[in-house]
Image: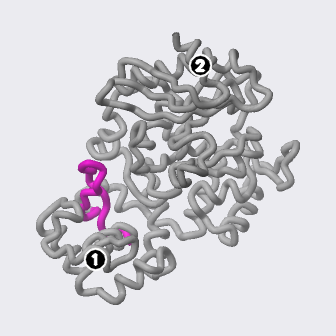
Amino acid sequence: MFNRVRLIQIDSVNVLVRSHYLPAFSRLGVYPAGLLDRMAYGRRELFEYWGHEASLMPMELFPLMRPRMERAKRGELWRSIARFARENAAYVESVYEEVRARGPMPASGLSEMGIRGQGWWDWAPGKLALEWLFWTGRLTTTRRSNFERVYDVVERVIPAEILRAPVATEEEADRELLAMSALALGVATAKDLADYFRIKMPAAKPRIAELVDERRLLPARVEGWEQPAFLDPTAKVPRHVDARALVSPFDSLVWERARMQRLFDFHYRIEIYTPSHKRVHGYYVVPFLLGDTLVGRVDLKADRKAGTLLVHAAHVEQHQDARAVAGPLAEELRLLGEWLGLERVRAGARGNLARTLRSALR
C-alpha cells in the first residue's frame, strides 16, 4: 500500500479510530492491530514528517525531505515558530542537548517546559522548541505515547544508510515527489499533484513540465475537467472496479476536496470543526465507496465501553438506490466493527438511508 500511496496523514481524532489506521483497512480489509506502529516505531520502515500534513512515509523518502528541513532552518516554513527559534536560540539548543543527553522524551518530560500559553497554538516554549527541532530535522519521532510524540535525535532513529544517502536538491526532491503523487493519484491536475506533498504551485509547475519532457508524466484530457490533466505512464483503466470501502476523512483519496468533487460529484466536508447547529450529515462523517462511486456517507462513533459501532446518521447520495447501497454498507460496517473489536453495529434514525440500513443490519 505504501508503495502506491507513499504517505498517510496522521491525525489525533479518535471518535472512531485514529484516522491514520483507516487507509490500510479501506484498501486491504482487516489487518493486525498495531502493525502500522510496528512498521514505524519498531522496524523503522516508516518515519514521521510533514509530507502532506503530519505524515507517515517510507524511510527511503527521508532524503527527499531534507531540502524541506533546510527550508525550515532558513525560516521559510512555519514562520511563527521560526521567529520563536531565532529569539530563543540558546533555549532551543538547550532542549536539543537535553534530548541528546537523556534520551527519548515527550515534551512533558523536559526539565524546563516553560509556561503554557506563551507560544504559538498555546504551546509551551518547550513544545515549540521540540517542534522546531523536528521541523528542521535534528529530532524525529521515535515512538508515540498516548499519541504524544516522543522525540529523539535523528541519528538514533533514522538508519545510518538513510542518513548517508545523497541529499537531493530542492528541485530534484520536488520532481521525485510529484512523480510519486502521479503514481498515487493516477490522473490529476497540476494543482492535485502539487497538493499531495504540499509543494507550492510556482515550484511545482516547472518540475511538472520537466516530468512531461522526460515522459514520466503524460498530458491528458479528462471529460468535464476545465484544467489540463496529467497521467502516470503506468496507470491502467480497469474494465470494472469492485471496491467497497469506508474512507477516512484524512485519506489521500478525498483530502483534496476539489478533486473529489470533480471525480465523484461528491461535495464533502468533515464537520467536526462545524458548530453542531450547522452540521448537515453529522460529526465524524465517513464517505462510502462502492464500485467506482462514492454513494453515501455515515456518521460513525466507536462506543468501546458498550462494544458497539454507532451509526448516528446514514445518507445516500442523490440518484443512488438506497437498497443497493444499504446491503454492502452493512457488510462493511460489520467488518469495521470486527476489526475494532466491537460486538455489534447499531444504526440510528437520522438520514435518508437510516431506515434501509437498519433493515439491512437486521
Q: Position of residue 196 (x, y in %)?
A: 60, 54
Report the amino acid beneath label 1: Pro
Callout 2: 10 Å neighbours few (<14), some, many (20+)? many
- Residue that appears at 47% across and 80% down: 79
Q: Position of residue 353 (x, y in %)?
A: 64, 25
Q: Left or right? Give the position of 53 relative to 110.
A: right
Q: Position of residue 103 (x, y in %)?
A: 15, 62
Chain part drawn in magenta: 136-154
Q: Report which residue position mark 2 lands on.
A: 357
In the picture shown, does residue 96 fall above or below 344? below
Q: Report which residue position mark 1 lands on.
A: 125
The image quarter containing residue 303 is: top left
- Residue that appears at 55% across and 63% down: 173
Q: Which colour scheme is used?
A: one colour
Kindly give the residue lying farthest to the front in the view shown: 277
Most frequent secondary structure within the magenta stretch: strand
The image quarter containing residue 295 is: top right
Q: Left or right? Give the position of 117 relative to 83.
A: left
- Residue that appears at 44% across and 34% down: 301
Q: How many marks?
A: 2
Report the amino acid beneath label 2: Leu
In the picture shown, does residue 257 fall above or below 77? above
In the picture shown, does residue 45 fall above or below 25? below
Residue 173 counted in the magenta span: no
> Of tags 2 and 1, which is closer to the observer?
2
Q: For the residues marked 2 and 1, what is the alpha-carbon distance in whole angstroms? A: 50 Å
